[in-house]
Image: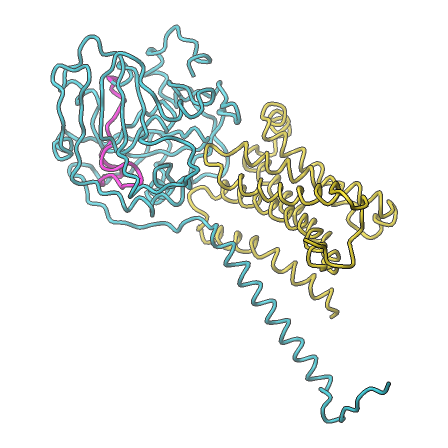
Amino acid sequence: MRSPKIKTSEITPERVYLNRRNFLRAGLLAGTGAATALAYSAFRPGQTLDSEFSNIEGISDGEKTLGGESATSFDDVTNYNNFYEFSTSKTSVARAARSLTNRPWTVEVGGLAARPRTFDIDELLGFPQEERIYRFRCVEAWSMVIPWVGFELRKLLEQVEPLSTAKYVAFETFYDPDVMQSSFAAGIDFPYVEGLRLDEAMHPLTLLATGLYGKQMPNQNGAPIRLVVPWKYGFKSIKSIVRITLTAEQPPATWNLAAPHEYGFYSNVNPNVAHPRWSQASERRIGEFSMRETLMFNGYAGEVAGLYTGMDLKKFF
Amino acid sequence: MSDVKFNKALIAFNSLIPLAMLGVDWYRGALGANPIEFFLRATGVLTLIFVLITLAVTPLRRIFSWNGLIKYRRMLGLFAFFYASLHLVTYSLFDKGLDIGAITGDVLQRPFIAVGMAAFLMLVPLAVTSTNGWVKRLGGKRWAKLHRLTYVIAVLGVVHFWMIVKSDIFYPAIFGTAVAVLLGMRIYWRFRPGRARATPVPSTPLQQ
């Protein structure tokens, strides 16, 4: 069979054909490249969120250092957070936590106390506030130095007069599933709860923090009031507290309930006791590239080691 | 430029975009407060993605008869090796300060590191034998047999990811499901009744 006759004028000149092909190829490069870039972008870390927070009176603007260690930048402290109620991605919490309404706010303090009562947040902000610059060591082996503002927890507990039968203190975080839309696979139960032994709670290092860097506490860091226990892993320092209860028995603690063999009730920072899945001997200080040695009790051994005399810290981790 | 050459360039271009964006974000300080952790996670996830794409080539050929895809499989596998190498170098350099003793200790003490390291060590011979010369030297059948290690690597990769997650297993579960589907299809094709074993790529579309 003869092929149909095509007029020479209908044949695409080679130059045009090649141009068309090059055009198509350029389109393919640009199109697939854009699609790949877009797909990758979905997994980029959230952009740093700049927000305004009002100042707390009486806190100096001076340089924030702890011995030779300078404080972690405000941007890093407020954009790298574990707050599983909002997101399990540390760089996404700041944005997600904007939905938290931190006024009005009350903290119910009760349990085994002679004068249990509910405190309004303004009343708590009326306690004399001071700056405390502490190391903060996360169980995930990163750390920060944070200039907290707050007051000692014992000042609050003294007001409700703990009974002699009280041996522990239980804490509970605010929980509203409507504004706290975490991953359905977050893997821990809410509301988040934590606990301390009474002597740990009464220790002068144990702080109820209402702010950082001289400003009111940002939502992502646990507004309006949170616990700070500097010699324990960060997850013990429970955020956005609504209830404090004095108890006779050891209270439940969220991560301890989720994985008891990985997160003990005490969870003191201890470079000699590894997490079952990773070492705790060193840590990455946010803002630095190389690792630092982790210090026993996060560097507060002089102040708190006495609380654990005679205890096997490998057993009570 | 031939079509195959162009397609290879297209794949390489797309495969390097995540690295380029990581680099730009790092330079701009946009990788978050812990850029090393992000880079480490990203290169790990990219390794798994390239392992999955490599494993998807055979099912795509069988289901859609896209036989031409085979030409790009080794290249995709090499990108898996490339991102795995970046992942290992980042860990060795920034987490362990290139201290071989510390790395060995980690492998011995931390099961998730041991699993990841095993997967990487299996990738090495596959990368080395990815050249035409090695395919000839080994012979097609033996070469294919060796490269079935990819199945083991994929499983170890998901296990490694699953083990490091603190409690939110969403992403490891997605990768686990993908690996299960991709390997499950192979098991199904191999053992389903009424079909000869080890059928090469069929020339007609499959029924079902």
- Label the yellow chain with its letter: B
Residue in the picture at 21% in, 8% down: A165
| Res A194 quadrant in image | top left
Q: Position of residue A147 (x, y in %)?
A: 29, 34
The residue furthest top is: A310
- Coloring applied to the structure: by chain
Q: Nearer the viewer, residue B138 or B144?
A: B144
Q: Nearer the viewer, residue B96 or A95?
A: A95
Side (left or right) of A238 relative to B179 = left
Q: Position of residue A155 (x, y in %)?
A: 17, 21
Number of marks present in the image shown: 0
- Label the cyan chain with its letter: A
Q: Position of residue A291 (x, y in %)?
A: 49, 32
Q: Position of residue A201 (x, y in %)?
A: 26, 19
Side (left or right) of A249 relative to A37 = left
User: Which region of the structure is painted magenta?
Assistant: A202-225
In which quadrant of the rendered image does the N terminus of chain A lie? Answer: bottom right
- A223 in magenta: yes
- B4 in magenta: no
Residue in the picture at 57% in, 32% down: B96
In which quadrant of the rendered image does the C terminus of chain A lie? Answer: top left
The residue furthest front is: B194
Residue in the picture at 77% in, 91% down: A6
Is B107 placed above or below A181 here?
A: above
Q: Nearer the viewer, residue A160 or A283?
A: A160
Residue in the picture at 44% in, 20% down: A260
